Each structure stands twice: as C-alpha cells, then as structure tokens.
Amino acid sequence: KIIEVGIGKHPEVALLLKDHLEMVVTDTSDLCMEGIRFVRDDIFDPNIHIYEGASLIYSIRPPVEIQHAIASVAKQVGADVIIRPLGSEKADLNKYFSESKLINYGDAVFYLYKQGD
C-alpha cells in the first residue's frame, strides 16, 4: 500500500500509480478523487490505522513541519518515505530512518528515506 499525504488539488501522481498499486490519498480537506481511495486525515493528529500496512508514504512539496510529521508516522508503521520538496524546503529526517538518498530525476529532486532491514 502506498499513501500520498496532502494530495490537495494535484492528483496527477496518484492517478498514474492507482492502476498499478494499492493507493490511498489523504488531505485535511474533503476532496472527491474519482478512482482513488481518499481518506480525510490530519498528519499532525493522524489516524494511524490509515497508514498501517503501508510500504511507502510520499508527499509532493510539503512544508518542513509536515515532512517531520510524515516521518514520524512512517517510523511508527515501518514505511519508507519519498519527499519531493519545494525548492530548498527540506527537513533533516535522518533521525527517523537508517538510510537516505538524494534522487535527481530530470529537473526534479526527490529524497528517499528507508527504514532499513
């Protein structure tokens, strides 16, 4: 199971993944995402059951404080994390994970954080 935190009004990535993976998307606003399982949740006060069983939690352009909240939830459920930061808005999440990696993909920068074996 893969979870996108803070989908907002940009479901493009989730729409690409939904036919190939079990996807859940979350946001604090009530949104209608046709063809995608949407759950209203606040990552600062998460319903941990939503995240249980996830192998990956990702977010696109989350603020630093949300990155820390995502990392905390991921650590609790044993999920890896991918963050696509906005510019240089990147939190130091190494304390939550055993491994981190910078991935450059075209003009995009991603940070992969892994729980380890």
Image (tube, grey):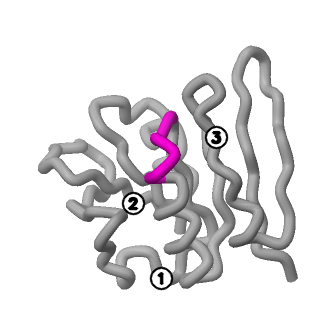
Count of numbered circles on the image: 3
Q: Earlier in the sequence, mark 2 or mark 1?
A: 2
Mark 2 to mark 1 CA distance (whole Å): 11 Å
The local crowd at label 1, few if under 14, some if 14 to 19, many if 20 or more residues have their Cα within 10 Å, is some
The segment highlighted magenta reads: 61-66
Where residue 108 sits in the image (x, y, percent)? 70, 23
Residue 24 numbered tag: 2
Q: Residue at x 38, y 81 (%)?
A: 48
Asked if the residues shown at circle 2 and circle 3 are in contact, with their CB atoms under 8 angstroms apart, the answer is no
Q: Quickly name the residue at label 1.
A: 52
* Residue 54 among those drawn in magenta: no
Q: Secondary structure at mark 2?
A: strand
Q: Residue at x 54, y 72 (%)?
A: 72
The local crowd at label 2, few if under 14, some if 14 to 19, many if 20 or more residues have their Cα within 10 Å, is many
Asked if the residues shown at circle 1 and circle 3 are in contact, with their CB atoms under 8 angstroms apart, the answer is no
In the rendered image, which quarter contains the C terminus?
bottom right
Residue 75 numbered tag: none
Q: Residue at x 69, y 59 (%)?
A: 93
Residue that extends furthest to the top in the rendered view of this protein: 107
Q: Residue at x 27, y 56 (%)?
A: 38
Amino acid beneath label 1? Glu
Residue 90 numbered tag: 3
Res. 75 image quadrant = bottom right
